[in-house]
Amino acid sequence: MPGYSTNELRNGLKVMIDGEPATIVDTDFVKPGKGQAFVRVKYRVLTTGRVNERTLKSGEGLDSADVVETDMQYLYSDGSTWHFMLPSTYEQYEANEDAVGDAALWIKEQDVCSVTLYNNVPLSVAPPNFVNLEIVETDPGVRGDTSSGGTKPAKLETGAVVKVPLFVQQGEVIRVDTRTGEYVSRAKD
Amino acid sequence: MSGGGRDGEGSGDSGGASAPGADWRPTALRAALVRRAEIAAAVRAFFAARGVLEVETPLIGAATTPELHLESLAVDLGGGAVGWLQTSPEFHMKRLLAAGSGPIFQLARVVRGGEAGRRHNREFTLLEWYRPGWDHHRLIGEVEALLEAVLGEGIGSAERLTYGEAFRRHAGVDPHRAPLAELDAAIARAGVAAPAFGPDDRDGRLHLLMALVVEPRLGPGVVALHDFPASQASLARVRPAAGGAPPLAERFEVYVGGVELANGFHELTDPAEQRRRFESDLACRRATGLPPVPLDHRLLAALGSGLPASAGVALGFDRLVMLATGAGSIDEVLAFPAERA
Protein backbone atom coordinates (compact mmCIF):
# COMPACT_ATOMS: atom_id res chain seq x y z
CA MET A 1 0.00 0.00 0.00
CA PRO A 2 1.53 3.34 -0.95
CA GLY A 3 2.25 5.63 1.95
CA TYR A 4 2.84 9.27 2.71
CA SER A 5 5.76 10.79 4.56
CA THR A 6 4.96 13.50 7.11
CA ASN A 7 6.07 16.23 4.72
CA GLU A 8 3.50 15.06 2.16
CA LEU A 9 0.56 15.26 4.54
CA ARG A 10 -2.08 17.70 3.33
CA ASN A 11 -5.56 18.53 4.45
CA GLY A 12 -8.05 16.21 2.83
CA LEU A 13 -5.57 13.38 2.32
CA LYS A 14 -7.00 9.94 3.14
CA VAL A 15 -4.77 7.83 5.36
CA MET A 16 -4.94 4.79 7.61
CA ILE A 17 -4.57 5.51 11.33
CA ASP A 18 -4.90 2.67 13.85
CA GLY A 19 -6.37 0.51 11.12
CA GLU A 20 -9.17 2.97 10.33
CA PRO A 21 -9.52 5.17 7.27
CA ALA A 22 -9.23 8.83 8.15
CA THR A 23 -9.09 12.17 6.42
CA ILE A 24 -6.52 14.75 7.49
CA VAL A 25 -8.11 17.90 8.85
CA ASP A 26 -5.07 19.85 9.97
CA THR A 27 -1.31 19.45 10.31
CA ASP A 28 1.15 21.49 12.30
CA PHE A 29 4.93 21.22 12.06
CA VAL A 30 6.61 21.77 15.43
CA LYS A 31 10.31 21.75 16.12
CA PRO A 32 11.85 22.75 19.41
CA GLY A 33 15.06 24.74 19.15
CA LYS A 34 17.75 22.43 17.97
CA GLY A 35 15.57 19.41 18.51
CA GLN A 36 13.71 16.83 16.61
CA ALA A 37 10.77 17.87 14.45
CA PHE A 38 7.27 16.55 14.97
CA VAL A 39 4.08 16.84 13.02
CA ARG A 40 0.80 17.13 14.88
CA VAL A 41 -1.95 15.66 12.78
CA LYS A 42 -5.64 16.25 13.34
CA TYR A 43 -7.76 13.71 11.52
CA ARG A 44 -11.36 12.68 11.17
CA VAL A 45 -12.04 8.97 11.39
CA LEU A 46 -14.20 8.33 8.37
CA THR A 47 -16.22 5.52 9.94
CA THR A 48 -17.22 7.49 13.05
CA GLY A 49 -16.73 11.13 12.09
CA ARG A 50 -14.76 11.69 15.29
CA VAL A 51 -11.81 14.08 15.17
CA ASN A 52 -8.63 12.89 16.91
CA GLU A 53 -5.07 14.11 17.19
CA ARG A 54 -1.80 12.31 16.78
CA THR A 55 1.83 13.39 16.90
CA LEU A 56 4.31 11.87 14.47
CA LYS A 57 8.06 12.18 14.26
CA SER A 58 8.98 14.13 11.17
CA GLY A 59 9.85 11.63 8.44
CA GLU A 60 7.56 8.91 9.75
CA GLY A 61 4.96 7.63 7.34
CA LEU A 62 1.27 6.88 7.19
CA ASP A 63 -0.31 4.36 4.86
CA SER A 64 -2.71 5.77 2.36
CA ALA A 65 -6.32 4.65 2.67
CA ASP A 66 -8.06 3.12 -0.31
CA VAL A 67 -10.69 5.81 -0.16
CA VAL A 68 -12.13 7.60 -3.16
CA GLU A 69 -14.89 10.14 -3.40
CA THR A 70 -16.98 9.81 -6.50
CA ASP A 71 -20.22 11.21 -7.85
CA MET A 72 -23.00 8.65 -8.09
CA GLN A 73 -26.66 8.72 -8.95
CA TYR A 74 -29.07 7.69 -6.22
CA LEU A 75 -31.44 5.05 -7.61
CA TYR A 76 -33.79 3.90 -4.85
CA SER A 77 -34.02 2.62 -1.32
CA ASP A 78 -35.69 -0.47 0.00
CA GLY A 79 -35.71 0.91 3.52
CA SER A 80 -32.50 -0.70 4.76
CA THR A 81 -30.26 -0.37 1.72
CA TRP A 82 -29.73 2.60 -0.55
CA HIS A 83 -28.73 1.87 -4.11
CA PHE A 84 -26.39 4.11 -6.08
CA MET A 85 -25.00 3.93 -9.59
CA LEU A 86 -21.76 5.10 -11.13
CA PRO A 87 -23.05 6.85 -14.28
CA SER A 88 -19.95 6.11 -16.35
CA THR A 89 -20.08 2.31 -15.92
CA TYR A 90 -23.67 1.69 -14.70
CA GLU A 91 -22.00 -0.17 -11.84
CA GLN A 92 -24.24 -0.30 -8.80
CA TYR A 93 -23.27 0.13 -5.15
CA GLU A 94 -25.25 -0.57 -2.00
CA ALA A 95 -24.94 1.75 0.97
CA ASN A 96 -26.23 0.82 4.40
CA GLU A 97 -27.95 3.10 6.89
CA ASP A 98 -24.71 4.07 8.65
CA ALA A 99 -23.13 5.16 5.39
CA VAL A 100 -26.14 7.12 4.20
CA GLY A 101 -26.76 8.80 7.56
CA ASP A 102 -28.48 12.17 7.35
CA ALA A 103 -28.20 12.21 3.57
CA ALA A 104 -31.35 10.05 3.60
CA LEU A 105 -33.27 13.13 4.73
CA TRP A 106 -32.46 15.03 1.58
CA ILE A 107 -32.01 12.79 -1.40
CA LYS A 108 -34.53 11.87 -4.07
CA GLU A 109 -34.18 9.29 -6.77
CA GLN A 110 -31.88 10.50 -9.59
CA ASP A 111 -30.02 12.97 -7.34
CA VAL A 112 -26.25 12.96 -7.79
CA CYS A 113 -24.44 12.45 -4.48
CA SER A 114 -20.80 12.33 -3.48
CA VAL A 115 -20.17 8.79 -2.29
CA THR A 116 -17.01 7.95 -0.37
CA LEU A 117 -15.83 4.42 -1.12
CA TYR A 118 -13.51 2.56 1.21
CA ASN A 119 -12.21 -0.69 -0.29
CA ASN A 120 -14.89 -0.16 -2.92
CA VAL A 121 -17.75 -0.13 -0.37
CA PRO A 122 -19.73 3.07 0.34
CA LEU A 123 -18.50 4.51 3.62
CA SER A 124 -20.44 7.75 3.54
CA VAL A 125 -22.79 9.68 1.33
CA ALA A 126 -22.93 13.44 0.99
CA PRO A 127 -26.08 14.88 -0.56
CA PRO A 128 -25.88 17.74 -3.05
CA ASN A 129 -25.34 21.04 -1.22
CA PHE A 130 -28.73 22.27 -2.47
CA VAL A 131 -31.82 20.21 -3.16
CA ASN A 132 -35.31 21.10 -4.38
CA LEU A 133 -38.05 19.32 -2.44
CA GLU A 134 -41.82 19.50 -2.29
CA ILE A 135 -43.63 20.43 0.89
CA VAL A 136 -46.07 17.66 1.75
CA GLU A 137 -47.37 19.07 4.98
CA THR A 138 -47.46 22.52 6.61
CA ASP A 139 -50.00 24.73 8.34
CA PRO A 140 -51.57 27.41 6.22
CA GLY A 141 -49.58 30.49 7.18
CA VAL A 142 -51.38 33.58 8.36
CA ARG A 143 -49.87 36.72 6.90
CA GLY A 144 -48.57 39.06 9.59
CA ASP A 145 -48.35 36.39 12.25
CA THR A 146 -44.87 36.77 13.65
CA SER A 147 -45.42 34.96 16.95
CA SER A 148 -43.28 32.05 15.77
CA GLY A 149 -40.50 34.28 14.43
CA GLY A 150 -42.08 34.41 11.02
CA THR A 151 -41.46 30.74 10.29
CA LYS A 152 -43.33 27.47 10.58
CA PRO A 153 -42.30 23.84 10.29
CA ALA A 154 -42.82 22.14 6.95
CA LYS A 155 -42.51 18.44 6.20
CA LEU A 156 -40.83 17.62 2.88
CA GLU A 157 -41.40 14.72 0.53
CA THR A 158 -38.27 12.99 1.84
CA GLY A 159 -39.51 13.18 5.43
CA ALA A 160 -37.21 15.99 6.54
CA VAL A 161 -38.76 18.88 8.50
CA VAL A 162 -37.43 22.38 7.87
CA LYS A 163 -38.49 25.84 8.98
CA VAL A 164 -40.03 27.86 6.19
CA PRO A 165 -41.43 31.41 6.00
CA LEU A 166 -45.15 31.74 6.67
CA PHE A 167 -46.01 32.58 3.06
CA VAL A 168 -44.78 29.25 1.73
CA GLN A 169 -47.62 26.78 1.18
CA GLN A 170 -48.15 23.05 1.06
CA GLY A 171 -47.46 21.63 -2.41
CA GLU A 172 -44.77 24.19 -3.22
CA VAL A 173 -41.21 23.15 -4.08
CA ILE A 174 -38.48 24.82 -2.03
CA ARG A 175 -34.70 24.97 -2.20
CA VAL A 176 -32.86 23.72 0.93
CA ASP A 177 -29.20 23.95 1.92
CA THR A 178 -28.43 20.39 3.06
CA ARG A 179 -25.32 21.45 4.99
CA THR A 180 -27.36 23.58 7.39
CA GLY A 181 -30.80 22.08 6.86
CA GLU A 182 -32.14 25.58 6.18
CA TYR A 183 -34.71 26.89 3.72
CA VAL A 184 -33.08 29.01 1.02
CA SER A 185 -35.90 30.06 -1.31
CA ARG A 186 -38.85 28.87 -3.32
CA ALA A 187 -37.60 26.76 -6.19
CA LYS A 188 -37.50 28.75 -9.42
CA ASP A 189 -39.41 26.25 -11.51
CA MET B 1 -16.76 14.59 4.95
CA SER B 2 -19.76 16.79 4.16
CA GLY B 3 -19.57 19.17 1.23
CA GLY B 4 -15.82 18.55 0.70
CA GLY B 5 -16.19 16.40 -2.36
CA ARG B 6 -18.87 18.58 -3.84
CA ASP B 7 -17.09 21.84 -4.51
CA GLY B 8 -13.48 20.67 -4.96
CA GLU B 9 -12.53 19.11 -8.26
CA GLY B 10 -10.69 15.94 -7.40
CA SER B 11 -9.29 15.28 -3.98
CA GLY B 12 -6.40 16.82 -2.14
CA ASP B 13 -5.35 20.43 -1.89
CA SER B 14 -7.86 22.99 -0.83
CA GLY B 15 -5.71 25.51 -2.67
CA GLY B 16 -7.65 24.81 -5.83
CA ALA B 17 -5.65 23.36 -8.68
CA SER B 18 -6.74 25.71 -11.40
CA ALA B 19 -4.62 27.00 -14.27
CA PRO B 20 -0.83 26.66 -13.85
CA GLY B 21 0.57 29.82 -12.31
CA ALA B 22 -2.79 30.97 -10.95
CA ASP B 23 -1.18 31.31 -7.51
CA TRP B 24 1.40 33.82 -8.68
CA ARG B 25 0.38 36.51 -6.20
CA PRO B 26 2.30 37.16 -2.96
CA THR B 27 0.83 35.72 0.24
CA ALA B 28 1.83 38.74 2.34
CA LEU B 29 -0.19 41.93 2.26
CA ARG B 30 1.75 44.98 1.19
CA ALA B 31 1.38 46.45 4.70
CA ALA B 32 3.19 43.41 6.13
CA LEU B 33 6.04 43.83 3.65
CA VAL B 34 6.30 47.50 4.62
CA ARG B 35 6.48 46.52 8.31
CA ARG B 36 9.09 43.88 7.44
CA ALA B 37 11.28 46.47 5.74
CA GLU B 38 10.85 48.87 8.68
CA ILE B 39 11.91 46.18 11.14
CA ALA B 40 14.99 45.31 9.06
CA ALA B 41 15.90 49.02 9.10
CA ALA B 42 15.32 49.19 12.87
CA VAL B 43 17.56 46.15 13.39
CA ARG B 44 20.35 47.72 11.36
CA ALA B 45 20.01 51.01 13.26
CA PHE B 46 20.08 49.12 16.57
CA PHE B 47 23.38 47.42 15.77
CA ALA B 48 24.92 50.45 14.09
CA ALA B 49 24.33 52.43 17.29
CA ARG B 50 26.07 49.68 19.25
CA GLY B 51 29.09 49.41 16.98
CA VAL B 52 28.25 45.92 15.72
CA LEU B 53 29.44 45.38 12.16
CA GLU B 54 27.04 44.09 9.52
CA VAL B 55 28.55 41.25 7.48
CA GLU B 56 27.55 38.92 4.67
CA THR B 57 28.72 35.31 4.37
CA PRO B 58 28.23 32.61 1.70
CA LEU B 59 24.86 30.95 1.20
CA ILE B 60 26.61 27.99 -0.47
CA GLY B 61 29.35 26.42 1.62
CA ALA B 62 31.83 23.64 0.92
CA ALA B 63 30.69 22.03 4.19
CA THR B 64 27.65 22.23 6.40
CA THR B 65 26.43 21.30 9.84
CA PRO B 66 26.25 17.59 10.68
CA GLU B 67 23.55 18.31 13.26
CA LEU B 68 21.00 15.50 13.19
CA HIS B 69 17.85 17.57 13.14
CA LEU B 70 18.88 19.96 10.37
CA GLU B 71 18.59 18.96 6.73
CA SER B 72 21.12 20.73 4.50
CA LEU B 73 20.20 20.82 0.83
CA ALA B 74 22.96 20.13 -1.67
CA VAL B 75 23.59 22.21 -4.78
CA ASP B 76 25.02 20.77 -7.97
CA LEU B 77 27.89 23.11 -8.80
CA GLY B 78 28.73 21.38 -12.08
CA GLY B 79 31.67 19.15 -12.88
CA GLY B 80 30.74 16.79 -10.07
CA ALA B 81 31.24 19.44 -7.39
CA VAL B 82 28.64 19.76 -4.65
CA GLY B 83 27.97 22.73 -2.41
CA TRP B 84 25.70 22.98 0.62
CA LEU B 85 23.04 25.59 1.24
CA GLN B 86 23.75 26.90 4.71
CA THR B 87 21.23 26.23 7.47
CA SER B 88 22.74 29.10 9.47
CA PRO B 89 25.62 31.53 8.91
CA GLU B 90 27.25 30.33 12.12
CA PHE B 91 30.35 28.58 10.79
CA HIS B 92 31.35 31.43 8.50
CA MET B 93 30.66 34.06 11.15
CA LYS B 94 32.83 32.17 13.64
CA ARG B 95 35.64 32.22 11.10
CA LEU B 96 35.26 35.99 10.95
CA LEU B 97 35.41 36.18 14.76
CA ALA B 98 38.54 34.03 14.79
CA ALA B 99 40.05 36.40 12.23
CA GLY B 100 39.47 39.33 14.61
CA SER B 101 36.30 40.88 13.21
CA GLY B 102 35.02 42.02 16.61
CA PRO B 103 31.24 42.07 17.21
CA ILE B 104 29.28 41.21 14.03
CA PHE B 105 25.70 40.70 12.90
CA GLN B 106 23.98 39.44 9.79
CA LEU B 107 20.49 39.26 8.35
CA ALA B 108 21.11 35.97 6.60
CA ARG B 109 18.92 33.98 4.27
CA VAL B 110 19.20 30.31 5.27
CA VAL B 111 17.72 27.09 3.90
CA ARG B 112 16.52 24.04 5.81
CA GLY B 113 15.03 21.09 3.96
CA GLY B 114 11.86 19.48 5.24
CA GLU B 115 10.69 22.43 7.31
CA ALA B 116 7.22 23.63 6.43
CA GLY B 117 4.41 24.77 8.66
CA ARG B 118 2.69 27.72 10.24
CA ARG B 119 6.01 28.95 11.63
CA HIS B 120 8.43 27.27 9.24
CA ASN B 121 9.38 27.81 5.64
CA ARG B 122 12.07 26.05 3.62
CA GLU B 123 14.07 29.27 3.42
CA PHE B 124 13.90 32.05 5.94
CA THR B 125 15.89 34.89 7.44
CA LEU B 126 18.04 34.58 10.54
CA LEU B 127 19.23 37.59 12.45
CA GLU B 128 22.45 36.23 13.87
CA TRP B 129 24.96 38.10 15.95
CA TYR B 130 28.10 37.52 18.03
CA ARG B 131 29.57 39.35 21.00
CA PRO B 132 33.23 38.58 21.76
CA GLY B 133 33.95 38.70 25.48
CA TRP B 134 30.30 38.30 26.50
CA ASP B 135 28.57 35.35 28.12
CA HIS B 136 25.08 34.10 27.31
CA HIS B 137 23.42 35.90 30.22
CA ARG B 138 24.67 39.27 29.02
CA LEU B 139 23.54 38.43 25.50
CA ILE B 140 20.01 37.61 26.74
CA GLY B 141 19.97 41.23 27.94
CA GLU B 142 20.80 42.46 24.45
CA VAL B 143 18.06 40.29 22.92
CA GLU B 144 15.63 42.00 25.32
CA ALA B 145 16.90 45.40 24.25
CA LEU B 146 16.49 44.50 20.58
CA LEU B 147 12.92 43.26 21.13
CA GLU B 148 12.11 46.49 22.92
CA ALA B 149 13.64 48.55 20.12
CA VAL B 150 11.64 46.68 17.49
CA LEU B 151 8.40 45.70 19.22
CA GLY B 152 8.14 48.68 21.58
CA GLU B 153 8.56 49.40 25.28
CA GLY B 154 5.59 47.29 26.30
CA ILE B 155 7.37 44.04 25.63
CA GLY B 156 9.10 44.10 29.04
CA SER B 157 12.14 42.21 30.21
CA ALA B 158 12.48 38.47 30.00
CA GLU B 159 11.58 36.03 32.71
CA ARG B 160 14.73 33.94 33.08
CA LEU B 161 14.08 30.32 33.79
CA THR B 162 16.30 27.26 33.68
CA TYR B 163 15.30 24.42 31.38
CA GLY B 164 14.91 22.25 34.49
CA GLU B 165 12.57 24.74 36.22
CA ALA B 166 10.44 25.10 33.11
CA PHE B 167 9.97 21.32 32.86
CA ARG B 168 9.23 20.96 36.56
CA ARG B 169 6.69 23.77 36.41
CA HIS B 170 4.89 22.92 33.18
CA ALA B 171 5.42 19.18 32.66
CA GLY B 172 5.83 18.14 36.30
CA VAL B 173 9.04 16.30 35.64
CA ASP B 174 12.80 16.74 36.20
CA PRO B 175 14.28 16.63 32.69
CA HIS B 176 17.82 15.94 33.90
CA ARG B 177 17.22 13.10 36.35
CA ALA B 178 13.79 11.56 35.80
CA PRO B 179 13.88 7.98 34.55
CA LEU B 180 12.50 7.55 31.02
CA ALA B 181 9.33 5.93 32.40
CA GLU B 182 8.56 9.21 34.21
CA LEU B 183 9.02 11.16 30.99
CA ASP B 184 6.62 8.76 29.28
CA ALA B 185 4.16 9.30 32.11
CA ALA B 186 4.47 13.08 31.65
CA ILE B 187 3.77 12.66 27.93
CA ALA B 188 0.75 10.49 28.71
CA ARG B 189 -0.51 13.01 31.32
CA ALA B 190 -0.45 15.71 28.67
CA GLY B 191 -2.82 13.62 26.57
CA VAL B 192 -0.43 13.56 23.66
CA ALA B 193 -0.76 10.58 21.34
CA ALA B 194 2.99 10.25 20.93
CA PRO B 195 5.17 8.43 18.46
CA ALA B 196 7.26 5.50 19.66
CA PHE B 197 10.71 6.40 20.96
CA GLY B 198 13.71 4.12 21.21
CA PRO B 199 14.36 2.61 24.65
CA ASP B 200 17.27 5.01 25.27
CA ASP B 201 15.94 8.05 23.46
CA ARG B 202 15.85 10.57 26.27
CA ASP B 203 16.29 13.63 24.07
CA GLY B 204 13.47 12.52 21.74
CA ARG B 205 11.09 12.44 24.69
CA LEU B 206 12.37 15.78 26.00
CA HIS B 207 11.98 17.39 22.57
CA LEU B 208 8.37 16.18 22.37
CA LEU B 209 7.54 17.46 25.86
CA MET B 210 9.26 20.72 25.03
CA ALA B 211 7.38 21.26 21.78
CA LEU B 212 3.93 20.16 22.87
CA VAL B 213 3.78 20.79 26.61
CA VAL B 214 6.38 23.25 27.88
CA GLU B 215 6.73 25.77 25.03
CA PRO B 216 3.05 26.62 24.65
CA ARG B 217 2.90 27.40 28.38
CA LEU B 218 5.88 29.76 28.45
CA GLY B 219 4.82 33.34 28.83
CA PRO B 220 2.80 35.45 28.29
CA GLY B 221 5.60 37.83 27.46
CA VAL B 222 9.25 37.09 26.99
CA VAL B 223 10.85 34.03 28.60
CA ALA B 224 14.52 33.11 28.34
CA LEU B 225 15.29 29.46 29.08
CA HIS B 226 18.89 28.58 29.88
CA ASP B 227 21.00 25.68 31.21
CA PHE B 228 19.97 22.98 28.74
CA PRO B 229 20.87 19.30 29.11
CA ALA B 230 24.46 18.64 28.03
CA SER B 231 23.12 16.20 25.42
CA GLN B 232 21.48 19.19 23.68
CA ALA B 233 24.53 21.43 23.85
CA SER B 234 24.85 21.77 20.08
CA LEU B 235 27.67 24.32 19.76
CA ALA B 236 27.49 25.66 23.29
CA ARG B 237 29.96 25.20 26.10
CA VAL B 238 29.11 22.59 28.69
CA ARG B 239 29.57 23.45 32.35
CA PRO B 240 30.79 20.30 34.11
CA ALA B 241 28.67 18.70 36.82
CA ALA B 242 29.19 20.46 40.13
CA GLY B 243 27.67 20.33 43.61
CA GLY B 244 25.00 17.78 42.68
CA ALA B 245 24.01 19.65 39.51
CA PRO B 246 24.24 17.69 36.26
CA PRO B 247 26.51 18.97 33.47
CA LEU B 248 24.62 21.80 31.74
CA ALA B 249 24.91 23.40 28.34
CA GLU B 250 25.40 27.18 28.40
CA ARG B 251 22.69 27.60 25.84
CA PHE B 252 19.54 29.70 25.85
CA GLU B 253 16.29 30.00 23.98
CA VAL B 254 14.08 33.07 23.95
CA TYR B 255 10.31 32.63 23.67
CA VAL B 256 7.68 35.29 23.17
CA GLY B 257 4.15 34.21 23.98
CA GLY B 258 5.19 30.56 23.83
CA VAL B 259 6.78 30.89 20.39
CA GLU B 260 10.47 30.13 20.05
CA LEU B 261 12.20 33.19 18.69
CA ALA B 262 15.94 32.85 19.32
CA ASN B 263 18.59 30.33 20.21
CA GLY B 264 21.91 31.40 21.70
CA PHE B 265 25.14 29.93 22.97
CA HIS B 266 28.04 30.74 25.15
CA GLU B 267 30.12 29.48 22.27
CA LEU B 268 32.23 26.38 22.32
CA THR B 269 35.80 27.45 21.45
CA ASP B 270 37.69 24.22 22.06
CA PRO B 271 38.61 22.73 18.65
CA ALA B 272 39.15 19.21 20.01
CA GLU B 273 35.73 19.18 21.68
CA GLN B 274 34.18 20.67 18.52
CA ARG B 275 35.72 17.94 16.38
CA ARG B 276 34.53 15.29 18.84
CA ARG B 277 30.91 16.60 18.63
CA PHE B 278 31.04 16.79 14.82
CA GLU B 279 32.34 13.25 14.59
CA SER B 280 29.77 11.96 17.04
CA ASP B 281 26.99 13.57 14.96
CA LEU B 282 28.46 12.12 11.76
CA ALA B 283 28.64 8.67 13.35
CA CYS B 284 25.04 9.04 14.45
CA ARG B 285 24.08 10.06 10.89
CA ARG B 286 25.70 6.91 9.55
CA ALA B 287 24.00 4.75 12.17
CA THR B 288 20.53 6.16 11.49
CA GLY B 289 20.80 6.30 7.71
CA LEU B 290 20.86 10.09 7.46
CA PRO B 291 22.88 11.45 4.55
CA PRO B 292 26.53 12.16 5.37
CA VAL B 293 27.84 15.72 5.09
CA PRO B 294 31.44 16.91 4.78
CA LEU B 295 33.24 18.01 7.92
CA ASP B 296 33.98 21.74 8.05
CA HIS B 297 37.76 21.69 8.25
CA ARG B 298 38.02 25.47 7.84
CA LEU B 299 35.89 26.02 10.93
CA LEU B 300 38.01 23.57 12.92
CA ALA B 301 41.17 25.33 11.70
CA ALA B 302 39.69 28.69 12.73
CA LEU B 303 38.92 27.33 16.20
CA GLY B 304 42.44 25.93 16.30
CA SER B 305 43.89 29.36 15.62
CA GLY B 306 41.77 30.79 18.43
CA LEU B 307 38.09 31.77 18.56
CA PRO B 308 37.67 34.53 21.13
CA ALA B 309 35.37 33.63 24.00
CA SER B 310 32.00 34.83 22.67
CA ALA B 311 28.28 34.60 22.99
CA GLY B 312 26.17 34.34 19.86
CA VAL B 313 22.49 34.14 19.05
CA ALA B 314 20.29 33.40 16.05
CA LEU B 315 16.87 35.02 16.02
CA GLY B 316 14.13 34.12 13.56
CA PHE B 317 13.57 37.38 11.70
CA ASP B 318 10.34 36.20 10.05
CA ARG B 319 8.91 35.28 13.43
CA LEU B 320 9.92 38.68 14.75
CA VAL B 321 7.88 40.23 11.93
CA MET B 322 5.02 37.84 12.74
CA LEU B 323 5.05 39.12 16.32
CA ALA B 324 5.14 42.74 15.22
CA THR B 325 2.23 42.29 12.81
CA GLY B 326 0.21 39.77 14.81
CA ALA B 327 0.45 37.28 11.94
CA GLY B 328 -0.74 33.74 12.65
CA SER B 329 1.23 32.18 9.82
CA ILE B 330 4.67 32.79 8.37
CA ASP B 331 3.03 33.05 4.92
CA GLU B 332 1.59 36.40 6.03
CA VAL B 333 5.07 37.92 6.31
CA LEU B 334 6.71 36.26 3.30
CA ALA B 335 6.17 37.56 -0.21
CA PHE B 336 6.38 34.05 -1.62
CA PRO B 337 6.50 31.01 0.70
CA ALA B 338 7.97 27.75 -0.60
CA GLU B 339 4.70 26.59 -2.19
CA ARG B 340 4.70 29.67 -4.42
CA ALA B 341 8.43 30.12 -4.85
Image: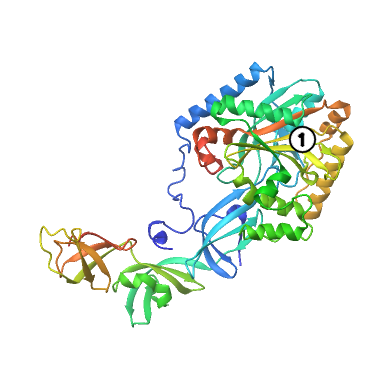
Q: Which residue is mark 1?
A: B62
Residue drawn at the location 62% of the way across and 48% of the way down? A30
Badge 1: chain ID: B
Please say whether residue B152 is visible from this viewpoint. no
Q: Position of residue B231 (x, y in %)?
A: 79, 46
- A63 vs A129, left or right, is right
Quadrant showing the N terminus of chain A? bottom right
- B148 vs B208, left or right, is left
Q: Position of residue A188 (x, y in %)?
A: 18, 60
Residue drawn at the location 61% of the way across and 62% of the way down? A62
Badge 1 density bin: few <14, some 14–19, many ≥20, Cα 10 Å: some
Q: Picture quarter containing residue A132?
A: bottom left
Question: Going by the picture, which residue comes out furthest to the left?
Answer: A143
Which one is nearer the viewer's eye here, B280 or B59?
B280
Q: Is residue B120 above or below residue B303?
A: below
Q: Position of residue A87 (x, y in %)?
A: 37, 71
Which one is nearer the viewer's eye here, B15 or B200?
B200
Give the number of marks. Answer: 1
Q: Is residue B319 above or below residue A90?
A: above
Which one is nearer the viewer's eye here, A181 or B240?
B240
Please say whether residue A173 is visible from this viewpoint. yes
Residue drawn at the location 47% of the way across and 36% of the way down? B26
Q: Picture quarter containing residue B278?
A: top right
Quadrant showing the C terminus of chain A? bottom left
Q: Secondary structure at mark 1?
A: loop
| Amino acid at the residue labelled 1 | Ala
Q: Picture quarter containing residue A94?
A: bottom left
Residue drawn at the location 15% of the way across and 63% of the way down? A168
Q: How is the image coloured?
A: rainbow
Q: Position of residue B124 (x, y in %)?
A: 61, 36
- B333 vs B47, left or right, is left
